[in-house]
Amino acid sequence: MSAYSLSALGALVALGVSSLACADQVLSSRSLSPNGRPVQEIRFGEEPGGNNLRVVIVTNGPTAGTTTLLTGVGAPHLWYDPSQQAPTFTDVIASGTVFSLGGGCRRGNQLDFPFINGNRPQIMRVQNGQATVFPLPITDNLLYDSAECAVSPDFLETWFIYSNRNTNRLSVFVDDGGPNDLVVPITNFPSVKTPFQGGIRPQISPYPGEPRVMSLLFMETDGETRWKKFSTNPFNVDFDCLTGAQVPPPTGFTIPRGARVAGNSVIGDFNDDGQLEFAFIDTTTPGACATSPVYTPAGPVAGTGYNWTEPGAAVSAERRFIAFVYGQLLSRQAGSQPTFAPGPGPGSGGPFDACGLFTVEQDDVLITAVAEALNNFRFSQYWKFPPPPPPPGRDEVFRSSMENPGVALTLLCSELGLSQ
């Protein structure tokens, strides 16, 4: 069984968001079971050509090496509204060694979900409603153990990263539609402690406000986790910041070590103390990158169903705050300190994902999913914050369309570059 298939017990429940009284407000919620097997990984993506939510999951198989990659698509409210007919899942890979599902990264008419199958880098690509799988056309025969992608803020490039545990390097590919984009990486970062060697799962996101600049997070072989800001055109590393250190460095796989990066915000267990830490990387002064940032404790890694956590990340539709979902909901607006809200599934651990979305009545709404119980997962729609009060002395007219507040109008699944 793959390392990412260890300790799987359940499937996906949702995370809450705070209302006026800082309590969760669940607008709608439902539980699904795609194929009767434990759900191990989940990713959301915006279906090209419409406003549908594409969901991709990995479930465990009956024996080692028989994981299944499945996908379903439907209007957002069909996923979380129990009064509606739920979308159905279909097998993309019925039985394989699938793990480290990344994505979904939408650019133009394509939506990508990179993953590893048989220790090789592959991509599931959705175009015109059809999902196809293809391996990267690289010529080596080495072993890879993590995959992820991000879309540039100008939506002209898709960046893919794959870690290679034979050479301890992280390969970065840039796809802008050229025929040879995925054959040769634009660069390889050396000295990477890959997930199968005990390192955190490498992460990538667009950097806010700069069209061809990305944020990259990974652990080096000496146990230091680095946050790098670099541009692809031209290629240049602008910042190389220390995020945390594990002393001594890990020597082998124990659990999947999930992490996420969104602009300058990062979350993960960087020192292997069993607790997630949130940090905001200060890039105002290059010298500030020489020391670890100040951590905000963010809760335990282990939960009741899983002994690991894979956080999800989203950006709000209205006010562009970053939200991490992982058994709690941690959010941060630019220039502010992080705030926390409890969720209906606290302490569960396991895989999470989220997207921001507009509805006709609420502004800051998320759709989330997380492991709930054996072989089930739950989707929920959550209201994060009400609109801010008007400034003193300014009149505010109450606005309402008097329509169904559960109907989603616009998804924001690839827009992590909109906020810091």
Image (spheres, rainbow, N blue to C red):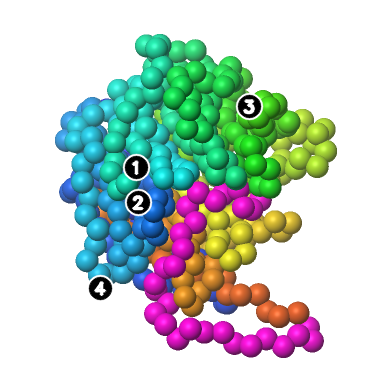
| Distance of label 3 from label 1 (alpha carbons) | 36 Å
Q: Are marks 4 and 2 in contact (CB under 8 Å)?
A: no
| Distance of label 3 from label 4 (alpha carbons) | 49 Å
How crowded pointer 2 is (Cα within 10 Å; few <14, some 14-19, many 20+) is rated as many
Q: Is residue 199 above or below residue 34?
A: above
Residue 212 position within the rendered picture, expressed as x and y whole percent measured from the top left: 64, 37
Q: Is residue 25 above or below residue 31?
A: below
**Residue beneath label 1, please?**
126
| Amino acid identity at mark 2 | Arg
| Distance of label 2 from label 3 (alpha carbons) | 35 Å
Reading the chain from its start, which is encountered first: label 3 or label 4?
Answer: 4
Q: Nearer the viewer, residue 234 or 104?
A: 234
Numbered mark located on residue 83 in the image: 4
| Amino acid identity at mark 4 | Ser
**Residue 346 occupies which quadrant of the picture?**
bottom left
Q: Overall secondary structure of the magenta stretch?
A: loop
Q: Is residue 402 left or right of residue 39?
A: right
Q: Nearer the viewer, mark 4 or mark 2?
A: 2
